[in-house]
Image (spheres, grey):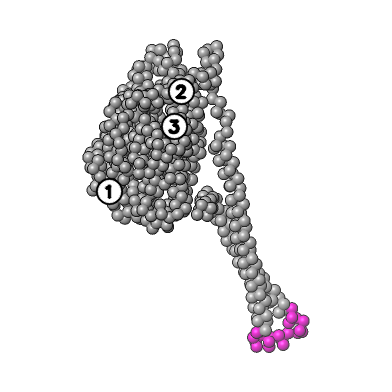
Amino acid sequence: MNTLVYILILPLLGAFIGYYIGTKNEMKRDLFNIVLTAIELLLVITLFPAINDQAIEYMVPNVMGTGLHLKVDMLRYAMLFISALAWFLTTMYSTQYLIKKKNRNRYYFFFMLTYAMTIGVFMSENIINLFTFFEGMSLTSYALVIHDEDKYSHEAGKSYLAMAIAGGLVMLFGIFLAFDYTGTLDIEEMGKILPNLGDIKYVIALLIMFGFMIKASVFPLHTWLPKAYTAAPTPSSALLSGILLKTGLFGIIIVLVEMMNYDMPIAVLLYCLGLVNIFLGGILAMMQRNIKRIIAYSSMSQTGFMLMGIGLVGILGKEGGLALSATILYMINHAFFKILLFMGTGIIYMILGELSINKISGFGHKKQKLKAFFLIGVLGLCAFPGFNGFVSKTLLHEAILEAYHLTHHHFFKITEYFFIIGGGLTVAYMLKLFVAIFMEKNSDFYGKYNELVHKRALIPMGILAGLIVFIGVFPNAILTPLIRYAEGIGFDAISHVVIYSSESVIYSMMSLLIGVLIYQLFIQRKLYVKNKTGGAYFNPSLGWFSIETDLFEPVLKMLYKVFSFLFTLIDNWLLFTAKILADGIKSISNVDIVTSIDREFKSVPLGASMMLKGLKSKKDALKNIEAKVKINEALELDLVQGQTSKLKELIVKGHSKMTSISNSIFLFGIVVVFCFLFVYVMG
């Protein structure tokens, strides 16, 4: 069996085996999961020499109807590697974090299932395979989001699942259209036909990207993100931000690069959405007081930088190799420092059970190891020279300058300034977070809880911190294979890029200075209120316009009423039709009764006639016959009433079934109608 298949099925089988072991002994289950994820990581690492030369493909027939088509090139391998490493480290971390949590066995079961589905997403070359794993990942990760089973978790899970299902339905509609127009489900083959289809290609591409955009938290489809990240246990939050978010970005890259051949209009759209994400996510992150919500909105903002990179790939076309390399490296780096920051947050929550910076201010002032690891994550995220974030952001900045020199369009010069200011927003909200937790002095925490910061939680953080520094100091160790990959798939040769130049350091310092100014002039003066006990942050965004509650929910309620009215009309029409049929049957039945009686009366037997002659009078004979007719009428009426009663029962059952059908297909109906309208307008 091929190595790709082993990599795919190992966590899938491990989920069931681990669950069984957990019913007997939880310590053995924890050890089993750590060993399993370590083996998976080793398998992925051993795959690198082959991937470094060329892509590997493997086909398993008769799976999912269309066959299971697996492929690993450098893009997919980068996603596989960060997934394998992230799951190994978070599994080790979870054994400490989940000690006081309930339903641990269930958690690890869905934890490993999500791992298998995520691996499937990154290795799929067949669009149906990719969709199946993508939706499976959404369903299994839903169980992680609602793990605590409190009211907030269920609300967050409802938002997460609703968005995932809606995105999946829209994506599936796009896949159906793509198959109808191209006649193939293979991504590479589809990419040879789709770009030549005319305007309908934009309909198909946008429908497919819709689901990916939800997972990537692209504005305005980001509404699930702060709730889900906050509600989920911290190891799951780390994976949601570090890895599952990347499945959305990965899907967008696949659509733009492999299916749409670097289409310019879509690329410009992604570039502009990236700018919106950077600023909206950054501003909302500055407002928050909950650590997880700060990091969640930070993920939304960082998604904007990666979206800009993806957009630049399409804008630059064959010269977009540097942009592609920078984007992939940004995705890798983001996974490392975001998982590290979430792990640091989890340690604080394990000890204090609190995440508000107003209540934990000064907690980490004397926690030197935790403070050092968290600081490395902050510096990586803020793109400080010497850390991994600086490398990817510098390369992305170079790609923006390349777009400006290629097109001479001032739009890119303006967006360069926005890019630098966006970096300043990152510095501002992370400065707020780090200063509040680790720099403020609070005697209530001095000398306390040090023994509760265990090595099992610190070791994964130390590994991630080491990788952040390593990539910052030796960027070519990862950048060289990525550049070789970009050139291998058809991009023009990339000239030598100097990462640590005076210009790149100056740009980094500009963002740093802007961030410090925003922190001092806005956060400290406008968001911090001093009082007798010291001071506290407040969040003015709580009263702002909410896309979910003020837009999505009212629109969906209106659509529900409209579609309910339409489905009610359909129900009533069916009932009216059934009533007409019933009346017709009743009329036919009455005619049959009269005919039957008339025939019976006219065909009285000869013996009966002789008996009638023997009666005393005609009057008695008529009374006798009338009585017979009444008996027949009563019998026939009972028969008709019985038939009518059964018919009414069938009608009631039919109405009940139609109503339930209406309710069950309501959401799907909305999606299909709007997709058809979209196809009609755009096509």
Does 123 appear above or below 347? Answer: below
Q: Which residue is the site of mark 3? A: 416
What amino acid does circle 1 point to?
A: Glu
Res 598 seen here: yes
Q: Nearer the viewer, mark 1 or mark 2?
A: 2
Residue drawn at 30 percent across, 54 percent down: 61
- The type of residue carrying mark 2 is Ile
- In the image, what residue type sits under mark 3? Glu
Query: Is 658 above or below relative to 270?
Result: below
**Label 2's element?**
helix
- Kindly report the distance in space between the C-alpha atoms of the residues bearing marks 3 and 2: 14 Å
Image position, residue 278 (x, y; %): 46, 32
What type of secondary structure mainly makes up the magenta span?
Answer: helix
Q: Label 2: which residue?
A: 514
Q: Which mark is residue 57?
A: 1
Q: What residue is shown at x 39% (from left), y 39% (from top)?
A: 406
Look at the image and give the residue range highlighted in magenta.
Answer: 603-623
Residue 186 is left or right of residue 157, and the answer is: left
Q: Position of residue 389 (x, y in %)?
A: 36, 28
Q: Are marks 1 and 3 in contact (CB under 8 Å)?
A: no
Query: Going 59% across and 41% down the picture, which residue do you hit?
Result: 554
